Amino acid sequence: MSTQTPVRPVESAQGPVEVHRRLPRFAPTGLYVAGIVVGALLAALTTGGLNIALTVVYGAVLGTLAVWLTSRAVEGRRKGTDRLVTCLVTTAFVIALVPLVSLVYTVLSKGLERLDSTFFTSSMLGVVGEGGGAYHAILGTLIVTGLTTVISVPIGLMTAIYLVEYGSGRLKKAITFLVDVMTGIPSIVAGLFAFALFSIFFGPGIRLGIMGAVALSVLMIPVVVRSAEEVLKLVPNELREASYALGVSKWRTIVKVVLRTSIAGLGTGVTLAIARVIGETAPLLITTGLLTSTNMNPFDGRMTTLPVYAFYQLTQPGFPPEPAIARAWTAALVLIILVMALNIVARLISRFFAPKTGR
C-alpha cells in the first residue's frame, strides 16, 4: 500500500500538475470538539446524567479517532499519523492540566473566604469556633525554613564544590551515591531521624523548632547538592585555566571566578530547594508539634508551621467544624502563594544575575 499523500491532477499550461489535498485549517479542531460533544452525549446516555470523567475519556477517544480517520482519508497515511500523534500529545497535556486547574480553583474558592487581615495578625490562642488566624504558623514557617536554609545551603554548596573541583576516586563516587540515596528518602524518615537524634540528648517527647529545621535539612541538602553540582559543571574550564595561568590559587579561583560566574544558577537552585521543603508536613508533625500561641524561639518549646496548622485545622476542627476548615483552606492558599513567590524569585534571579554573554 502506498504511503504517499493523496493527490489530484490539475490542468495547467504546462500540462497536468498534482496538488496535495489538505484539510481546512480549523477542521481538526472542529472534528475533535465534535468528538467531545458526542462523547458527552454517550456518557450521558450511559450514566443517565453528566459525568465529567466519562465525557473526558469518550471525548478524547472519539475526537482523536475522528481527526485521524478523516486526515488519513483526505491527506494520506503519513499526515494522518502525524495528526494522530498530535492529538495524543494534546490530549495527554489537557488531562494532566485538569487536576492542576481543579486544585487551584478549589483552593481559591474555599481559601479566599478567610484571607483577611485577621488571618495574618491573630493566632489561635484562646480561639474556639470563628475567628483566629495563622500569624503564629506563618512566623513558625519562616523561622523553620530560614534555619533550614542556613543549615543546608553551606553544606550543600561545599559538597558540590568538592565533587566538581576536588573530588576523585572512590570518595567522590561514595558521596554521589549517598546524595542520590538521600534524594529518595521519604519525608517521614527525615522526621524520625531528627526526632531520634534529639531524643538521645533531651529525652523522649521533645519538640523544638530546630528539630524541624534539621529534619527539613535532610531533605533539602541533596537538592542543593544536585542543583549546585550541575550549575558548577557548566562553568567553562577556560575560565579556570585563565585564572591559574595568572597565578591565582585554586580556592581563590573558585570563590572569585567559578562561584561568581554561576551565581545565578546557584541562587535559582537554592530558591527552588526552599520551595521544595517549605510545604513539608510529615516531618514537622513529629518534630515541631502544635502550638496555639506564638513562639519566636526555635530552641525552646513547640513551634507551629503552616502545613501542620492546616493539617490539624482540617483533621481536628472542633465544633462547629466550618470555621476551622475555612482556616485550613486559607492556610493551604497561603502556602501555594509562598511557593509561587519563591518560583518567581528563582526566575528573576536566573534572569537578572545570569552572566552577560552579549557584546
Image (tube, helix red, strand yellow):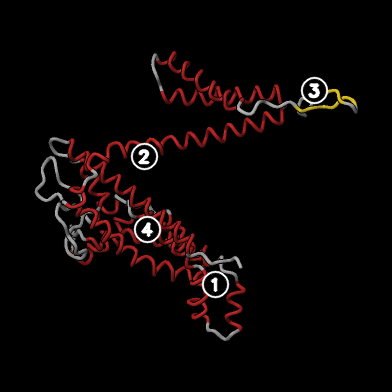
Please name whichever residue, 349 or 195, is drawn nearer the observer in this view of the structure.
Answer: 349
Residue type pointed to by label 2: Val
Q: Position of residue 46 (x, y in %)?
A: 44, 15
Secondary-structure class at tag 4: helix
Residue of label 3: 8
The amino acid marked with disc number 3 is: Arg
Mark 1: few/some/many CA within 10 Å (<14, 14-19, 20+): few
Circle 4 residue: 274
> Are discs 4 and 1 less than 8 Å apart at CB?
no
Gap in Å between the C-alphas at discs 1 and 3?
66 Å
The mark tally for this picture is 4
Which amino acid does the dot numbered 4 rest on? Ile
Q: Nearer the viewer, mark 4 or mark 1?
A: 4
| Residue 49 percent location from the top left of the image | 38, 16
Q: Amino acid at mark 1?
A: Ser
CA gap, disc 3 and disc 4: 61 Å
Sequence-wise, which precedes: disc 4 or disc 2? 2
Give the residue drawn at x 49%, y 34%: 94
Disc 1 marks which residue? Answer: 168
Q: Which residue is mark 2?
A: 104
* Labelled pair 1, 2 in contact (Cβ < 8 Å): no
